[in-house]
Amino acid sequence: MSGISLKGISKRYSDEVLAVDDIDLEIESGEFVTLVGPSGCGKTTTLRTIAGFEKPTAGEVHIGGKNVTDAPPYERNTGMVFQDFALFPHLTVHENVAYGMEADGGYTDEEIDSRVQEMLELVELPDTADRKPAQLSGGQQQRIALARALAPKPDALLLDEPLASLDKKLREQMQVELRRIQQEVGITTVFVTHNQEEALTMSDRLAVMNGGKFEQVGPPGDVYDEPETRFVADFIGTANIFDGTVTESADGVASVDCGDVTVLSAARADTAVGDAVSVVARPERFEFDSATADGGATDGRNVFEGEVTFRRHLGSSVEYRVETSDEREIVVVRKSGLDEHEPGDQVTVSVDADNCRLVST
Amino acid sequence: MATETSTSSSESGRAGLKRNAKYYILSYPLAWLVFVFLVPLGMLFMFSFWVHVPGTGYEPGFTLENYTRFFTSIYVDQLWVTLELALVTALASLALGYPLAYYLARIDRPVLRNVLLITIVSSLWITYVIRAYAWQVILASRGILSSLGVATGVLETHQAFYPGYWGLVVGMVYVFLPFMVLSLYSSIRNLDGELLEASKNLGAGPLRTFRKVTLPLTKNGIASGTSLVFILALGSYVLPRLLGTPAQRTLPVLIEQQVMSESNYPFGAAMSIMLILVMLLFLWAIVRIANVSAANIGAGDALSDDDEPAVSASSGLSSVRGLLGSASAAVGLTAVYDRVTSTLSDVVASVDSGTRESVIGATFRAYVAAVMVFIGAPLAIIVAVSFTPEEFLTFPPGGFSMRWYVEFFTNPAWVRSLVNSLTIAAGAALLATSIGGILAFTLDRFDYRFGALIGMFGVMPILVPPVIIAVAFLVFFLQIGLTGSRVGIAVAHGIFYAPLPFILITQGLGELDRTYEEAAMNLGASPVRTIRTVTYPLLRANVVSGALFAFILSLNEYIIAWLLSLFLVKTIPIQIFNQLRYSYPPTIAAASTVFILLTVVVMTAIDRLSGGIWE
C-alpha cells in the first residue's frame, strides 16, 4: 500500500504569489494520476512538494500512509523523471541506474548489477550500460531516466513533463511505452503535463489545475464528456462554448439566452433560472443538416446556419470552421469520407440538446 | 502527543543547526580575507602616518610628513613618469593587439587558433623576471638585435637598446599585450558575424565595415583592455627595474626601494596609498567618461571634426602634467590613422575589389604574423640560448650542450630555489582554492544579507597591485613573525590569488544545473553524498583549473615573494632576478626554460580540463 495523499496543501512564495491553494488529493496505490494545466497553474509545484523539493506552507503530504511533510527529498523514496532527464553526465548508464541503490546502501554489488540489467531490459535498452548519457538519443535518455527512477523500488513514480523535449512521433511512442511500463511495475504514478492530449491518453485519472486549485478530478472520459467548469471544457479537448443566462428549465432541458441566440442544453439537477452558465458542445457532436432550418433552437436541437470558412484534415477526421450570421465560429469535426464541404459552402449544422452540457462559467 | 513534541523539537534542532551552519562555513574564507587581507591593508594605511626614525626604522605616531615629502620632492615627478609609461604601454598594446585579436576571433581554423591562443596565454603566466630577461638578451649591447644590426650592416658598431625608455616600453608592451589581446578577443568573438555580412551586403567595403560596425561594437573590449593594461602597467615593478634607467624608476620601484633598501616603511606605505589613490581616480574617471571616450574611439570622424569630446575627456585628467602630451599624441595618432585609412580607401577604391580584398588580407596577415613573432620569439630565444655550450650568452648559440641544465639541477642553490618555488606554489594553491571554493559555494547556496558585497570582497585581493599588497603583508607579517619564511609567502600568495578559484568556481556553480542535485537527492543521496558524487565531479574542471591557476601564478610571482623573503627565502624568480644583477650565466636561461616548460604543461592541463577555456 503506497498511495499518496495530499491534505490541504498550500504553497505561498510571497504575499502575492500563492502557487498552490489548499488542494486535497487521494491517489490510490498503483494509480496513474495526471496533473494537467497551463503553465503557472501550480502542477509542478505540487509534484515538487510530493518529491520534497518544496516545503508546503500548509498541509500534509502522505506517501504509503506515512506523513513525509517534513522529510527531506532523500528520505521519501520517490522516483522522479525530470523534464530534461537530469542524467548525470559524468556517469555511465549503469552508474546512473545504480545510483539510487548505491545511495541506499542496502544492496550488494551483485544485487545492484542484476537490478540494473533488469531495469535496462524493462526499458528495452539492455546494451547501453557502458555508454555515457551524451551518447544516447533523446528517447533513449528518457528511458534510462525512467530506469534510474524505478531501480531503487520507489513507492511512487513522479514524472515532470518528461515527454516535452521529445519530437511528436517519439512522444506518442513514449506515451504508450511509459504507460506499459507503469502498469507492468504497478507503481503509483503522478504525471505532470501541460499537454491535454497526453493527460487524456495516459491516465487513470486526471486532475485539471488552474490558479493553484483543482478544477476537476476524474477519469479522462468523464473529464472530457462531462466537464464541470468552462475552464476544463476549454482546456481539455476542443469545445464550442456559449456563455449566457438560464431563462427556462423544464423536462431536463434548459434554455440559455446567449445574446443573439438561445441555446438548448441538457439541464442539471441544480440548474436554476437566472444562473450565468456556459453551454459546452464538443465538435464531433455536431452534424451537417441537408435541409435549411430557421436557426436557433428547434425540436430539442440547436441549429446554426453559416458559411464554411476553413477546413483541415486531421487524418481520420475533418475539422470545419463554420461562421454563423451573428459571427460566431463553430468548430465541427466529422469522420472523413462523410458529407464533405468546401470553404465557401453555405451549411446548416446542428447539435442535439442532450449532447450539450451546462457548466459553471 | 509525546512523539509529536519530540519530532518538532528535533526538527527545530536540525533547522537551527542549518541556520548557523551557513555562517560557520562562511566564516572560514571570510576570516582569511578579513584578518589576512583587510587588516594588512589597514595597517598599511596606518603606517603611512607613522614616523620614520632613521637607523632604527619607524615608530607609532601621526604625521603627514610622509605625504608632504612625496609631493615636494622628485618623487612626484616619478608619478608622472609612471603614468605616462602606463598610458604609452596601453595605447601601443591596443594598436598591436587589435588586429591580432580580430584575426584570432574570426579565423575558421580551430587548430591554428588554439595553437596561437595557447602561445599567447602561456606567455601570460611566465614570470615577468624571465620575460624581462629575454628582452635584456635581445636588447643588450652585443645582444641579438645589435648583433643582427651589425651583421646586416644597419649598425656600424654594437649598440645597447636597454636600459632606456624605449627598451622599457617594448618590454612593457610585450608582457601586457596578452591581456589586451584576450580582452579584445572575447569582445570580438561576441560580435555577430552576420552584422559584418549585412554591412558588406549593404555596399560597405572592408575598411568602412570595420570603422562603422566592428569598431563601435567592440568598444567595450577596447575600453576594458586598455584600462586593464593601464592599471597593470601602473603597478608593474619588475620591468621598470630590469629594463629602465634610474630616470624610469616608477612608483612601484621607489616603493620597493624605500622598504627594502632604506627601511623607510612609513614613506613606502604613503607612496603605496598614493598609488592606490591614483588607480581609484583612474577607475572613477573611466567610469565617468567611458561612454564619451568609447564613442571617440568608436568614431574616428567625430574626433577629428569636433574635438569637444576629446577636451571633456581629458579635462578630468588635465591637471596631470605629461599626460596631456601623450593624450595629444594619441589624438595625433588618431588623426594619422584617419589620414592613413582614408588614403588607403582612395587607393583601394581605384583597384578592383578582388585585388583589394587580397591586398588587405595579405597586409593584415603579415601584421598579425609580426605581432605573433613579437609575442613568441623572446621566449623561444631564451630556450635556444639555454643550450649554448659557452660560458657566456651568445646568439646564435655556438653549438648544442645540456651543460647548463646539468648545472641547474646539480647546483644546490638552484635546486633549493626550485623546491621552494614548488612548495610555496602548492601551499598557495591549496589555500587559495579552499578560500575561493568555499566562498563561492556558500555564496551560491545560501542567502546572506550582504552576499553581493562579500562576493566583491572575494575578488578584491587580485585587484590590488602586487607591490602594494606586498608592503601591506610585510608590515603585517613583521608584527606576527611570518616574514622570511616559506609559510608567509605561501599564505600571501594564497590570499592574493584566491579570487581566481573563487571566480572560476562561482562561474561553474552558476552553470551547474541544479536538477542534477535534485535527481541525486530524489534517488536517496544525502546532501553530503550529493556534493561528493554529483556536485564536485561536475565542478571538478573548475576547481582544478582554479587551483592550477593559483599554482602557476604563485610559481611565477616575484615582488610579493621578494619583499616577504627578507633575503632569507629564494624562489626561482628571486634567484634569477638576483643573478641578473651580477652576471649572465646561461644557467638563468636553463632555469627559465625549465620554468617555461612547467608553465606550458600546467596551462595545457588547464585547457584540457575545461575543454578549451578560451572558447
Image: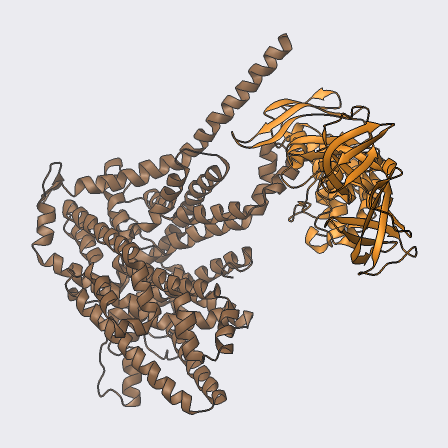
Q: Residue B283 lies in what quarter of the image?
A: bottom left
Left or right: residue B485 compared with residue A354: left
The number of discs equals 0
Q: Residue at x 48, y 28 (%)?
A: B21
Counting from the top left corner in percent of width and height, residue B215 is at 39, 70
Chain B's shade in the image? brown
Chain A's shade in the image? orange
Counting from the top left corner in percent of width and height, residue B95 is at 34, 72
Q: Is residue B38 visible?
A: yes
Left or right: residue A229 compared with residue B491: right
Viewer-proximal residue among B428 and A17: A17
The way the protein has been coloured in the rendering is by chain
Residue at the front extreme, as displayed: A294
Viewer-proximal residue among B406 and A173: A173
Left or right: residue B361 compared with residue A151: left
On-image quarter of the N terminus of chain B: top right
Viewer-proximal residue among B121 and B129: B121
